[in-house]
Amino acid sequence: MEGCIKTGIMGGTFNPIHNGHLILAKTAYELLALDKVLFLPSGNSYMKKNVLTVKNRIDMVRLAIASYPQFELSLVEANRAGNSYTSETLKYLTEKNPNTCYFFIMGADSLFQIEKWKNPKQIFSLAKIACAVRNDYNLNEIKQKGQQLQSLGADIIYLDIPKINISSTDIRTKVKEQRSIADDVPIEVANYIQQERLYYEKD
């Protein structure tokens, strides 16, 4: 659509949000010439267990993106009762914002899982997929998967981003083991995790 507001979507549990998420969002913003990027912390994740409270995760996202005027916090999924489904979120957003073109930003690992998500055809009909290409997968394998998904209506854009060796799982482990996470998350998030004593106990 010509003249639409180009908006990226970064969804996830953000348990916790980390520098890898921010690098991916910044890369997509720049390479796709987006107008803004929405960060959507999930409410109830039907695919993940042992997730922090919604409030804690929202607080961390808010702190992490505060210094980026092009990033915005959206509570669309966090405020929804029941499970969070990307297809339903996109349907809601496109109905509410008909002049917006959405770009759903994801890592290559999610591209290989998306057929298991609820109503993938609806996801593809409502948003372009911006897939981060890293060393986790062979580029040919990623593009082969992309070609398979085109049969379901997927329009996939590949983003070349630096390899990021940061994961929420590793951060939680580091906190339990009282190791520094200063290189993994913004300082505001690290301070919040310490103040709230998050992840210090076993999941």
Image (cartoon, helix red, strand yellow):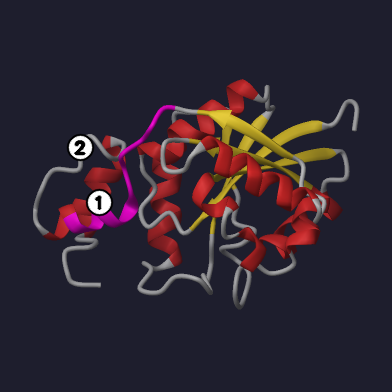
When asked about the image quadrant of residue 92, the answer is bottom right
Q: What residue sits 79% from the left and 32% below the top?
A: 5
Visible in this render: residue 15?
A: yes
Q: Marks 1 and 2, Cα distance to the nearest angstrom? A: 10 Å
Magenta residues, as a range? Answer: 162-173
Q: Amino acid at mark 2?
A: Ala
Image coordinates of residue 134 in percent, x first then y, are 46, 35
Image coordinates of residue 139 in percent, x first then y, are 53, 36
119, 188: nearer the viewer: 119
Residue 168 part of the magenta segment: yes
Residue 5 in the image: above or below residue 185: above
188, 133: nearer the viewer: 133
Q: Is label 1 in a helix, a strand or a loop? A: helix
Q: Amino acid at mark 1?
A: Ile
Return the mark for residue 182: 2
Q: What residue sits 63% from the left and 40% below the top?
A: 143
174, 40: nearer the viewer: 174
Q: Badge 2: how crowded within 10 Å, few (<14), some, or many (20+)?
A: few
Q: Is residue 137 left or right of residue 157?
A: left
Image coordinates of residue 19 in percent, x first then y, are 36, 37
Quarter of the figure that contains the N terminus: top right
